[in-house]
Image (cartoon, helix red, strand yellow):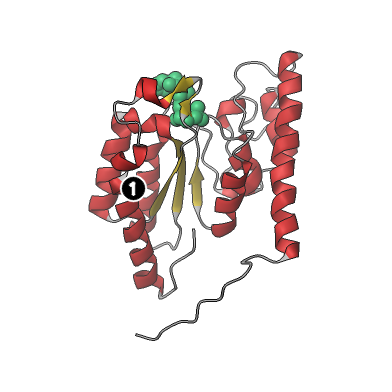
Amino acid sequence: MEEKEIHAGPIIDKKKGLELLYKMILIRRFEEKSAELYTKEKIRGFLHLYIGEEAVAVGVMESLTEEDNILSTYREHGHALARGVDPGSIMAEMYGKMEGCSKGRGGSMHLFDTNKKFYGGNAIVGGHLPLAVGMALASKKQNQPSLTCCFFGEGAIAEGEFHESMNLAALWKVPVLFLCENNLYGMGTALRFSHSVPEVEKKELHTVWNQLLLTEWTCWKYGKPPRRL
Ligand SMILES: Cc1ncc(C[n+]2csc(CCOP(=O)(O)OP(=O)(O)O)c2C)c(N)n1
Ligand SMILES: [Mg+2]
């Protein structure tokens, strides 16, 4: 097998770095404004902020293509903005307006934009994991090159859907990337109060396994090098 030279040094240049920083700051400012509007009761219903995790959404989106599907949690403003969903349509959604990305019917937890292949905004913890497996299975059956990227919090690992989804994804070898954002809290509850094994990586062996499968699948099917994620 041909050996490839590995270059040490920055993997992004200044221009790209500024572009990524801009996206992270956009998310931060958007959410600060949202919090302000929420306390003034301009935004009603729920509002869950992503402050502090901006780099995850921006970094991951950078590795995806326009063809890829994305599913997220109830804390998804950052993912939607990083994907390029129009900030105005997100704000309109929070105001419950027709101009909103979900026509004002979904609100903060149900941002949706099919043009951007952004499929929620899913308020049921873990509920979108089986959907992600289904979407990835559809891509595989239809010979589409798309990857399905599913963000979830570590809170979802205690749900049955997590285990069912990991099992089927590995069994069917579907092109899905499960991305766990472990912030050590499920809303306000610390991990150690809700998980018997708080080291979630011990429970995520299937996730790792599935990512390996995905990398293999991508290379095999499209003759491309594995994507750096
Ligand atoms: C099936 C289900 N059970 C309970 C809830 C209530 N709930 C909303 S958020 C949350 C915690 C989620 O934790 P995590 O996945 O770690 O997300 P984070 O708050 O860290 O973003 C819970 C239990 C829910 N939405 N769905
Ligand atoms: Mg969490």
Residue 144, by quadrant, is: bottom left
Q: In which quarter of the image is ligand 1?
A: top left
Q: Nearer the viewer, residue 207 or 106?
A: 207
Location of residue 78 in the rendering, given as x and y in whole percent from the top left corner: 62, 39
Location of residue 57 in the rendering, given as x and y in whole percent from the top left corner: 58, 45
Residue for point 44% across, 73% down: 224
Side (left or right) of 224 relative to 56: left
Location of residue 48 in the rendering, given as x and y in whole percent from the top left corner: 59, 25
Residue for point 34% across, 66% down: 216
Q: Is mark 1 within 8 Å of ligand 1?
A: no
Is residue 154 in sight in this rendering? Answer: yes
Q: Residues within 10 Å of mark 1 (few under 14, many from 20)?
A: many
Tell me which amino acid carries mark 1: Thr
- In this figure, what is the number of numbered marks? 1
Residue 37, by quadrant, is: top right
Q: In this view, does 213 lie above or below 77?
A: below
Location of residue 75 in the rendering, given as x and y in whole percent from the top left corner: 55, 31
Q: Is residue 224 above or below residue 97?
A: below
Q: Name the residue under label 1.
A: 207
Is residue 137 in sight in this rendering? Answer: no
Q: Which of 226 and 42 is in front in this view?
A: 226
Side (left or right) of 197 relative to 83: left
Residue, far bottom: 2
Residue for point 41% across, 29% down: 155
Q: In which quarter of the image is the N terminus?
A: bottom left
Residue 118, by quadrant, is: top right
Residue for point 56% across, 76% down: 7
Side (left or right) of 114 relative to 167: right
Tag 1's secondary structure? helix
Q: Which of 60 and 172 is in front in this view?
A: 60
